[in-house]
Image (spheres, rainbow, N blue to C red):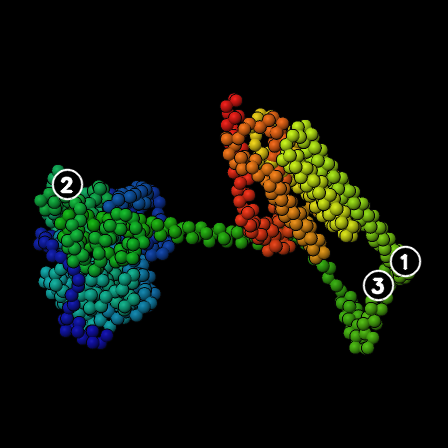
Amino acid sequence: MEKLIDQIKQGKVWSIPGGIHPPGQKLQSTTHAIARLPLPDKLVVSLKQHIGANGKLIVEKGQQVLKGQALTKPSGNWSVPVHAPTSGLISDICPMPSAHPSALPELSVIIEPDGEDKWCELHPVSDAKALSHDELVDIIHQSGIAGMGGAGFPTYVKADTRKAIELLIVNAVECEPYITADDMLMREHADGIIAGIELMQQLLNPQLTIIGIEDNKPDAIAAMKQAAQHNDSIIVQTVPTVYPSGGEKQLIKLLTGKEVPSGSIPADIGMLVQNVGTLFAVNQAVNEGKPLIERVVTVTGNTIHKQGNVWALLGTEIKHLLVCQGFSPVPQQRVVMGGPMMGFTLPTVRIGVVKTTNCILAPDHQELAEPGEEKACIRCSACADACPASLLPQQLQWFAKSKEYDKLNEHNLFDCIECGACAYVCPSEIPLVQYYRVAKAEIKEQQAEQIKAERAKERFEARKERLEREQEERQNRHKRKPAAKSDGEKQKVADALARVKAKSDDKDSKSAVAAAIARAKAKKQGAELEPDNSEVAKERAARKEQARKYKEQKAQEQGEESVDKDDKKSAVAAAIARAKAKKAAQATEENVSAETDAAPKDDKKAAVAAAIARAKAKKAAQATENQTEAEEEATPVDDKKAAVAAAIARAKAKKAAQAAENQTEAEEDSAPVDDKKAAVAAAIARAKAKKAAKEQVQSDDSSQQTNDSSAEADAQPQADAPESNEDKKKAAVAAAIARAKAKKAAKEQAQSDDSSEQINDSNDEADAKPQSDAPESSEDKKKAAVAAAIARAKAKKAAKEQAQSDDSSQQQDASSDEANSKPQVDEPESSEDKKKAAVARAIARAKAKKLQQEGNDKS
């Protein structure tokens, strides 16, 4: 810091980024001294003329006030009072347009001056050095002094900072065009400004005070140096003329080379900045006892005949200032409060002067042209080059238009000092500052709403806690408190506990304590000990055990009876199955005999075929019956085994009927059919075979229903319940027997075919060419048809029996089942057998074609 101070004393000045050089236009208002204006007809004193809360109103309508009398008193954070600018009558207290671009109404006190301009009692301080820190701050606070450079920050807040201030910087740059209020104040009241600086030094105790003045104000520089020559800690520093070097952070950079971090204030780096007008008001408040009721205002512009600076009472209407200075308005006249760069156009001239009003500009159309139509941004980067805060104005404008407030905060929107340099250099005439002002206002409003919501949430949670607490108190209020024990009772309890504890040390402490507790209970209740019921309990337990054994015995007997009943049912089912098998075989035999008898027996081939068919049917039925009886005798009487036997018997009966039908159909296919009678006979045979099979199925279904659900389960033992090893072996034996029978039937059929072919070899050869044979008789045709039907029935039955036997034994013996299901692969036939089979197939195809052709011709 010492090195920095040495550099400052040597007159070193640093540079700032950006900046512009607009025309100064200051000479017009510096040719005359600061003037005094006559009292206006009324004063509109706004209660809010600074940053912070409004003061509390302490006057009322119709009250007479004196000059310098307080109209409000501080109430709230950063609140400062306002005072009556002159003596007079309070004619009204009502909202009036504010000194703001929006002109929103603010509560104001309207005073009608009485013309006497009579002061209230003042309390000047003769020896300011004798005042304490708090007393001096209180005087500044009660005098209503706020920053007069444009921001309006309460001065007492800055003066009462608890941070160490190393450098006090006085802002006398006044860089904006047209404004000369501070310049003229320094020229005429330099001593008062220096006195205010010394009071501030007394409060802050800085190492050095720097007064920064632009080099275009030589008279002010000379006056300030002359007034400060007695104080070595005050330095007057000249800085280059560039706009906006009067910004707080920009001036610190110019004079010290240090930068204030984003979001921080100068006090964070040990510096504090005050305006020359503010320091002059501090001097008047302490040394003269006068509150802040007036300030210097520059009234300028081409429509003003007497351009200059005037002492304007706070609350004086702008119209009064213009009229007093010779205002000649032009069509569509604009009146600007502030300078051309940072000022704003007033919506009305009936607005009162406030503490931050430093200039009233009334230009004509040539002096300050109307802004043109906003055009599209061409991205020339001139705005970024001119920005003194090193921001990105183009980006900020885009985010402001799209209301992306988070992005605006990320790009440090609040570091913008609204100097207007970006808008001044923009070739597209985009009013960038207006976008920033609107965005700042919306963000502040949003933050205020968020704060309100948080406070409301805190109040709600506090209320909820209070209600819960009150509810708990109400519930506890109705609970009875335990009766307080007297000292005697407490002593008795203590004695009893001591006795119990002493007895617990003995070996039989548990029994002794139990006996003591039992005796105490007996004495307390006045009743005898309960009788011993152990014998009764034993008798009750014995009866329960006897009843349980009886129930188990009864349940066991019922189980045996049910088993006997099941055995009987199984035996009956097996007998029924055997009877049905016999009946089906007998019906098949009778059908075959009837068909054979009905046909004339003139042909040996037909007689032989019929005899063979009957023999095979009898043999298949007898074999089925013998197998069933053998399995019944070998199998012990058991529920599952009996059901399996019944199911096997029923299946074999079905197979016998189907085999007969298949044999009949096969014979029909192999026999020559030359007449309608032969076809009719074959159809009759097939119908009878199907009828026998259907009766067999219906009888099986009826027997299955009588045997209940257990018989159904036993019909498929491999899927319903797990079989034992013995059952699996028996099933495998039955499957093997069925396969053997099928093979035997097929072989016998082949032998019969061979014999018939040998007997009538010539006839067979001739049958291969039926178109050249002589026509057969009707009796021969009938016999041939019957034989063909029997052969077809046997063949179908044998094939179906083979497939079913393979399926039933597949789970027990997979390899053997697969081999047996394809006998033609396992047992290859000889060449002679193959020739015979081919001849038989050719004959059957020829007969079928002939039968079909005859049927078509007759139809």
Q: Which mark is drawn over residue 333?
A: 2
Q: Is residue 773 left or right of residue 295?
A: right
Foreground: 16 or 182? 16
Q: What whole-number distance in Å separates the C-alpha atoms at marks 1 and 2?
A: 123 Å
Q: Nearer the viewer, mark 1 or mark 2?
A: 1
Q: Earlier in the sequence, mark 3 or mark 1?
A: 3
Q: What whole-number distance in Å separates the C-alpha atoms at marks 3 and 2?
A: 109 Å
Please state which amino acid type lies under the numbered disc 3.
Answer: Lys
Q: Residue at x 64, y 44 (%)?
A: 748
Foreground: 119 or 435? 435
Q: Is residue 803 above or below residue 419?
A: above
How many other residues sit within 10 Å of disc 2, few (<14), some (14-19) or many (≥20)?
few
Q: Position of residue 89 (x, y in %)?
A: 29, 44
Residues at discs 3 and 1 in contact (Cβ within 8 Å) = no
The residue identified by callout 3 is 521
**Any part of residue 345 in sight:** yes
- Disc 1, SS: helix
Residues at discs 3 and 2 in contact (Cβ within 8 Å) = no
- Disc 3, SS: helix
Please state which amino acid type lies under the numbered disc 1.
Answer: Glu
Q: Residue at x 21, y 59 (%)?
A: 389
Q: Position of residue 720 (x, y in %)?
A: 67, 49
Foreground: 184 or 589? 589
Q: Earlier in the sequence, mark 3 or mark 2?
A: 2
Foreground: 708 or 279? 708
**Any part of residue 666 in sight:** no
Q: Residue at x 68, y 33 (%)?
A: 592
| Image quarter in which the N terminus is found | bottom left
Q: Nearer the viewer, mark 3 or mark 1?
A: 1
The residue identified by callout 1 is 539
